[in-house]
Amino acid sequence: MDAHLSVRKSNSILSEIERMRDRVMQRAYDIFSRSGERPGREVGNWLEAESELVWNPAMELAEKDNGFRIEVAIAGVDPKDIVIEATPEDILIKADVHHEHTAKKGEVHVCEFAHGSLFRSIRLPRRIDVDKVKAEFRNGLLILEAPAAEAARKILVDAA
């Protein structure tokens, strides 16, 4: 299924990143509390919390012909649930991901489907023209085309 998606222009994605960090921090603290508040497990608690809350899908960022192509593997996500925000320096991709087991499947022994929040922020190596970013969802792949911003023109001033 091919779908063209809209890209929202944003001044900053920092607040979104901070909000997600706060959610992971709270969950890591909950894990710490649940496990008897044993010191020395801070990194393990953080990684466990992050894996429970955030799906950080595989991606590729390539530069060619004065622009960037970003491919993100998000099979199983409904295109209408994908939110894309762009600043001149960053791309943020978000979606809530749900996977449910039904009785008709029988007893599920292993399930590796993502569940939670798809959250991928991508820092670009050069500025882009946010108004010209295009996004398409095709065969489980989110494809973004982002042309690089034109370099600021030099203005020469003649001295009299």
Image: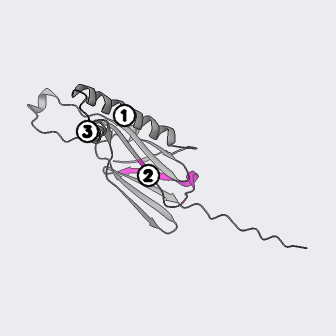
Q: Is residue 30 above or below residue 79?
A: above
* Neighbours of disc 3 within 10 Å: few (<14), some (14-19), many (20+): few
At 27% from the left and 26% from the top, the residue drawn is 33
Whichever of labels 3 and 2 marks the residue nearer the N terminus, that label is 3
Marks 1 and 2, how far apart at CA = 21 Å
Residue found at the far front of this picture: 39
Whichever of labels 1 and 2 marks the residue nearer the N terminus, that label is 1
Q: Amino acid at mark 1?
A: Met
The location of residue 24, given as percent across then percent down, is 35, 35
Q: Is residue 140 above or below residue 98?
A: below
Task: Give residue 122's mark.
Answer: 2
Foreground mark, 1 or 3, reads 3
The location of residue 49, given as percent across then percent down, is 29, 36
* Neighbours of disc 1 within 10 Å: few (<14), some (14-19), many (20+): some
The residue lying toward the viewer, choosing from 123 and 25, is 25
Mark 1 lies on a secondary structure that is helix
The residue lying toward the viewer, choosing from 37 and 22, is 37
For this view, does 7 lie left or right of residue 110?
right
Task: Give residue 8's mark.
Answer: none
Question: In the rendered structure, which segment of residues is drawn in magenta?
Answer: 121-140
Mark 2 lies on a secondary structure that is strand
The location of residue 16, given as percent across then percent down, is 47, 38
Q: Amino acid at mark 2?
A: Ile
Quickly name the residue at label 3: 40
Foreground mark, 1 or 2, reads 1
Look at the image and tell me whether residue 106 can be seen: yes
Q: Amino acid at mark 3?
A: Gly
Q: Is residue 149 magenta?
A: no
Q: Is residue 134 magenta?
A: yes
At 87% from the left and 73% from the top, the residue drawn is 159
Look at the image and tell me whether residue 115 can be seen: no
Quickly name the residue at label 1: 25
